[in-house]
Amino acid sequence: MKSPHRLLLVFALPFLLALAACGPSEEWTENQNIGNTAYQTGDFAAAEASFQAALAIAQEGWVTYPFVAISLDSLALVRTQLAQYPEAELYIRQALSMTEDAVGQSTSEYATRLSNLGNALHRQGRSNEAAQALTRALAIQSEVLGEDHTDAAITLNNLGEAQRGMGQLRDAEQSLNHAVAIAKSKLGEAHPNHGIFLNNLAGVLNDQGRFAESERMFERALQILQAGLNRGHPTIARAMEELAESYGTNGKFDLAETMFAQALDSTEQFYGPHHPRIAEILTKYAVMLRAADRSPEAMSMEARALVITGGTP
């Protein structure tokens, strides 16, 4: 079970504006800012179009770094939110290579992109590779930025997710607890990153069999995300999905069904009815229905999921 994507807020807007004076053009900055606004509202198609336009402008400039790398980062963000992880990995690797050539490996820029790469690898099930990249990124960030920097919190979150994927639950809990503490202290409890880190920590607790504790944490995380992100954002739907699973595990089938239905509806509206994410939710929904002794309905969900994934119902 994979937890919701964490937000990859790689470069703050003031940094982008400060660079504009020596960048390719004001048009590049404008396209980046338009893309950032669309991304934050969940309009990923518009965001990608703006980021692609910015990338083309940056590639034609006299000074390509860091502007090309920033646009590549932005495109990777979009691909990550669309669950297109191989494509995100390609963008990140291009940006990472540029960064190494321009400023070396012992820099915060390199560490941030290495952390993003670790996240993309984990999302493809390559948790061992991810953990290696993330451990290295965290070491750089701790040295350059300090152990409690918000960038380090993102890497700790990513590392915790990779450790969870490898079954290293105690290590994952420690990494995610640290990420949650930094986000709460530096960003505030209402920040979406705090909600995402909290949701991922709840997943680890759930894997440890601490079901009541994890359920409360899932509920709190969802409240934060619903308040901090636009309605229909895919991160909210993923949090709903995990809370629904938690309710099902605890035998609260009515609550689980309500939450699964909301997650499914939101995900269908965002991705369409035939996206692999729909199949993931349907499969988990079916598990809950079987536990509730509703096998015929579960079979219907499973059949639809198989059609989406190319299987035979």
Image (spheres, rainbow, N blue to C red):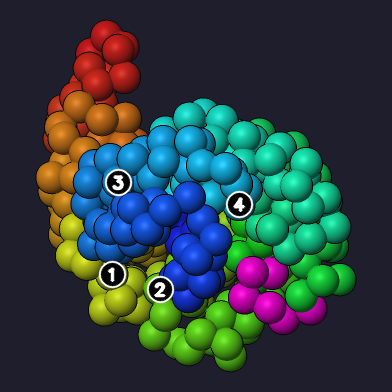
* N-terminal-most mark, 2 or 3: 3
As helix, strand or loop, the secondary structure at mark 1 comes to loop
Quadrant containing the C terminus is top left
Are the two marked residues, 4 and 3, in contact with CB atoms closer than 8 angstroms?
Answer: no
User: Mark 3 — residue?
Assistant: 50
Q: Which residue is drawn at 37% across and 58% down?
A: 26
User: Mark 4 — residue?
Assistant: 66
Residue lying at the far top in this picture: please name it. 312
- In reply to whether residue 167 is colored magenta, the answer given is no
Which of these two is toward me, 14 or 214? 14
Q: Residue 192 carries which label?
A: 2
* N-terminal-most mark, 1 or 4: 4
Q: Is residue 55 above or below residue 189?
A: above
Are the two marked residues, 2 and 4, in contact with CB atoms closer than 8 angstroms?
Answer: no
The quarter holding residue 55 reads top left
Residue 40: x and y in percent read 30, 63
Q: Which amino acid does label 4 sit on?
A: Pro
Q: Which residue is drawn at 16% across and 35% down?
A: 272
Are the two marked residues, 3 and 1, in contact with CB atoms closer than 8 angstroms?
Answer: no
As helix, strand or loop, the secondary structure at mark 3 comes to helix
Distance, label 1 to label 4, CA atoms, is: 28 Å
Residue 242: x and y in percent read 38, 57
* N-terminal-most mark, 3 or 1: 3
As helix, strand or loop, the secondary structure at mark 4 comes to loop
